[in-house]
Amino acid sequence: MLNSILTVKKNEVRSHQNIGWEIFTDEIIKAISKNFNGVVFMLWGEYAKKKNKLINNNSNLILESGHPSPLSANRGNWFGNRHFSQTNDYLISINKSKIFW
């Protein structure tokens, strides 16, 4: 699990946006995507979905969904997205061990 913005002020959503966290976390995503194959990236929420351009989808799996927060889970497609079972199906298909969630 990796949020794009790693800190916030208490009760102030995105209060530390545009202070450099996004640059740092984008570089982490790019490095993982470039140096590893068979990684599952679960992009939850509209902001996270924009990160798909940083990921090599030829050698990794990208799953997108609405965000699971109580404020948005019912508006998006969070419930029933099957990301955990899709992840295991993918891992098995590339001869990797499934995850016991």
Image (tube, helix red, strand yellow):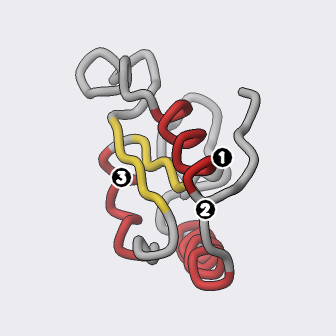
Q: Residues within 10 Å of mark 1 (few under 14, many from 20)?
A: few
Please name whichever residue, 24 or 37, is drawn nearer the observer in this view of the structure: 37
Image coordinates of residue 51 in percent, x first then y, are 40, 65
**Can you tell which of label 1 and label 2 is closer to the viewer?**
2
Q: Residue 23: x and y, percent?
A: 55, 77
Q: Which residue is mark 1?
A: 1
Residue behind mark 2:
39
Query: Which numbered disc flags the more N-terminal residue, 1 or 2?
Result: 1
Q: Mark 1 or mark 3: which comes first in sequence?
A: 1
The residue tagged 3 is 47
Q: Secondary structure at mark 3?
A: helix
Identify the residue shown where x is 64% and y is 52%. 2
Local SS, label 1: loop
Image coordinates of residue 72 in percent, x first then y, are 33, 24
Alpha carbon distance from label 2 to label 3? 20 Å
Mark nearer the N terminus (2 vs 3) = 2
* Along the viewing direction, whichever of 12 and 1 lies nearer the viewer: 1
> In the image, what residue occupies the spot 23% across and 21% down?
75
* Callout 1 amino acid: Met
